[in-house]
Image (spheres, helix red, strand yellow):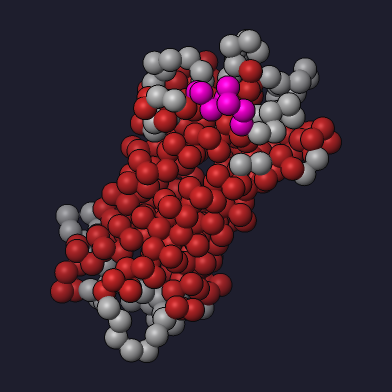
């Protein structure tokens, strides 16, 4: 398989390991209703154990590694198709920024096949307050009750989120790199700091551009958990809203809670996005250089 596949897979898995605790808080904030605007001490007590902080991480570590690999491979190949002058998509210095956005959007759409079931399983696992519930058990339960198609519940809004978000992801990363570029030789530590900073900024820009869509996705997936209100206080659903689509859910949130819920958890998400994507891009860039070796600057080679 190609160097960008393995670099994407490993960097994606590392990103999930680093960011899962903050992602857990973000998801619960998004799923909370009007009475739970902020995280109370009682709610924070849910995160007092190591197992609670990594809840829902198993599916993303496996799934997001594959997702990230598919994303970077699709982005790199799409960019070379959109711009024939690009021979090394890891360094598209002369490519127009809009082409980077389009290639990122195509990569996001391609990664949807993995991201949709992964996100659904992760969301269910993070919102399930029962102890000892694994991602695998949740996946089997979804298939048993909803069939294989059930793994793609809320898939439409997930696809829209991924396409738009990853368009801005690659666009903002390359734009930041160009803004920070200099003509002279730079120390390796300075270059590494620039990669970390550009990766972190790209993560924040990405989530800021699609956060309302992510809130709608989380609310739809949270409602799918069939449990009593007493056992799952975050998951109470108003009567008559059991079969909502994305537009209906968005309208319901706005009519009952206003605009604030669409950005609830954005602060936690931005912090997580900066840390995760800084580490992820640094890992990806280093692995690409390692896999390519002396061929750095040439078209991506196959290492299989």
Expressed as whole percent of the image width and height from the top left, the position of residue 43 reads 57, 25
In depth, the one of 202 and 168 nearer the eye is 202
Number of numbered callouts drawn: 0
Task: Name the magenta segment's main secondary structure.
Answer: helix
Expressed as whole percent of the image width and height from the top left, the position of residue 22 reads 48, 40
Look at the picture and state if 99 lies above or below 291: below
Residue 40 part of the magenta-drawn span: yes
Relative horizontal placement of residue 134, taking residue 215 as reference (left or right): left
Look at the picture and state if 24 lies above or below 213: above
Q: What residue is shown at x 79% (from left), y 35% (from top)?
A: 257
What's drawn in magenta, residue-wise?
39-46
* Residue 141 visible in rendering: yes
Q: Where is the N terminus found, in terms of image quarters?
A: bottom left
Q: What residue is shown at x 44% (from left), y 74% (from top)?
A: 177
Relative horizontal placement of residue 106, taking residue 190 as reference (left or right): right
Residue 167 part of the magenta-drawn span: no
In depth, the one of 111 and 91 nearer the eye is 91
Q: Residue furthest bottom?
A: 183
Expressed as whole percent of the image width and height from the top left, the position of residue 16 reads 38, 42
Relative horizontal placement of residue 54, taking residue 211 as reference (left or right): left
Q: What residue is shown at x 19% (from left), y 62% (from top)?
A: 291
Look at the picture and state if 153 lies above or below 134: below
Q: Where is the C terminus found, in terms of image quarters?
A: bottom left
Expressed as whole percent of the image width and height from the top left, the position of residue 259 reads 77, 44
In depth, the one of 275 and 285 nearer the eye is 275
Relative horizontal placement of residue 210, taking residue 9 as reference (left or right): right
Q: Quadrant of residue 234?
A: top right
Q: Residue furthest right?
A: 255
Q: Quadrant of residue 232?
A: top right
Q: What residue is shown at x 70% (from left), y 43% (from top)?
A: 262
* Residue 159 visible in rendering: no
């Amino acid at each position: 398989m190609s160097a960008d596949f393995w670099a994407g897979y490993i960097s994606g898995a590392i990103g999930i390991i680093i960011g899962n605790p903050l992602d857990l808080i973000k998801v619960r904030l998004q799923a909370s209703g009007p009475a739970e605007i902020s995280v109370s001490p009682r709610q924070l007590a849910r995160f007092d154990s190591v197992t609670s902080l990594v809840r829902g991480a198993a599916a993303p570590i496996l799934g997001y590694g594959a997702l990230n690999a598919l994303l970077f491979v699709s982005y790199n190949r799409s960019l070379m198709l959109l711009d024939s002058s690009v021979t090394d998509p890891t360094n598209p210095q002369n490519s127009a920024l809009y082409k980077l956005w389009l290639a990122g959007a195509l990569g996001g759409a391609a990664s949807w096949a993995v991201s949709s079931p992964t996100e659904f399983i992760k969301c269910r696992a993070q919102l399930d307050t029962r102890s000892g519930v694994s991602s695998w058990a949740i996946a089997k339960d979804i298939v048993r009750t909803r069939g294989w198609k059930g793994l793609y519940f809320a898939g439409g809004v997930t696809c829209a989120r991924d396409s738009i978000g990853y368009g801005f992801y690659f666009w903002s990363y390359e734009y930041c790199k160009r803004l920070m570029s200099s003509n002279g030789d730079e120390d390796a530590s300075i270059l590494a700091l620039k990669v970390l900073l550009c990766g972190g900024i790209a993560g924040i820009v990405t989530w800021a551009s699609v956060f309302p869509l992510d809130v709608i996705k989380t609310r739809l997936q949270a409602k799918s958990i069939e449990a009593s209100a007493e056992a799952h206080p975050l998951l109470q659903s108003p009567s008559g809203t059991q079969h909502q689509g994305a537009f209906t859910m968005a309208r319901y949130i706005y009519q009952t809670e206003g605009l604030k819920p669409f950005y609830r958890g954005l602060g936690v998400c931005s912090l997580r996005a900066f840390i995760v994507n800084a580490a992820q891009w640094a890992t990806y860039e280093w692995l690409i250089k390692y896999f390519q070796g002396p061929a750095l600057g040439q078209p991506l080679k196959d290492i299989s």
